[in-house]
Amino acid sequence: MIIDDTLDFGKYNGLTVREVYQGSNEINKELLKSYLKQRIEKPDANNDCSVLVEFANFEISATLLRITPVSDDLKGNWTSTIEGFFKDVYEPTTKWVFEIESLDDVNKQFSKDKEKVAVTNGNPSYIEWCIKNVDDFYLTPDTLSQLSEMNYFRFIGIEVLLKVDDIYEYKPKFVIKKHVFSEDMIRLNNEKYEASISENYVEDDDCYNNDDWDYSDDDDYCGGCESSPCRCSDPDPG
């Protein structure tokens, strides 16, 4: 595979090698909304999030959150509480009797009926897993080299600022990382790539082995000159 080829299997079905490896430095607002929705509706006994079940509504845009309390008693600055929703964003946890799903679990449900999963974190480890475990999966050496030079993104939460009343400005936070493929991984990938090239060469070579061709259905084939179409009447080149 090359860097912009699309995977046709697994949890990243429909994404390119680049998207799986690198992820995105943006977060899908509808995915974010789905995650926040469960956090608001499932109270946390360990902090002030428990009162957020009393919020009447929340809206989200590309840069703004609006969380409307049901009464004036609940008005205030909920910046730290909202940021706290993302403290353990990748770990499912139990709050009272409620199961809080991780962002990846929410993404799985969010993307269930969609053409492909929403891009969040880069996942170089998944590329390595495919090289090790999926028979037909390998990258060209150039692609592996390209990936080695690229950074990948990991979403770690949101930074929130109260603007006015119940409106908050937010922006996603990411860490930028670099992945290093081990020598063993590079060797394994290149062995699979070279084996595939050799296999394809043998198949192509077989195509030119005339002894294996069946001309029985070729009306233009001439047994005299062993050509199709017949070239018995061609001028003598000598």
Image: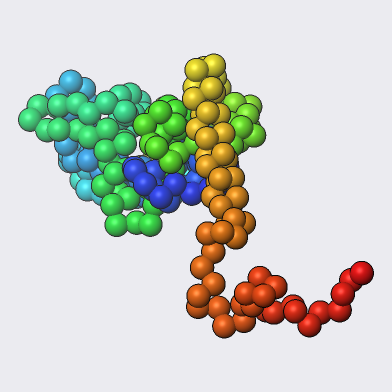
Name the residue at the top extreme. 183
Q: Which x, y percent locates residue 35?
A: 29, 40
Residue at 60% across / 50% down in the picture? 205
Residue 179 can be seen, yes or no: no
- Residue extending farthest to the left is 97
Q: Position of residue 21 (x, y in %)?
A: 50, 34
Q: Residue at x 45, y 39 (%)?
A: 137
Residue 73's spot in the image, x, y percent?
21, 36
Up/down of 31 relative to 99, above or below = below
**Residue 204 screen position, x and y as percent:** 58, 52
Q: How many marks?
A: 0
Q: Quadrant of residue 229?
A: bottom right
> On the rendered image, what quadrant is the C terminus found in?
bottom right
Q: Residue at x 36, y 31 (%)?
A: 133
Q: How is the image coloured?
A: rainbow
Q: Which residue is depicted at the point 41% across and 50% down?
A: 8
Position of residue 195 in the picture relative to residue 31 (left or right): right
Res. 186 image quadrant: top right
Q: Is residue 58 left or right of residue 211?
A: left
- Is 52 or 122 nearer to us in this picture? 122
- Asked whether 215 or 32 is in front, the reply is 215
Residue lying at the far right of the rendered structure: 238
- Of 210 and 139, nearer the camera is 210
Res. 190 visible in picture = yes
Identify whether 2 is placed above or below 231.
Answer: above
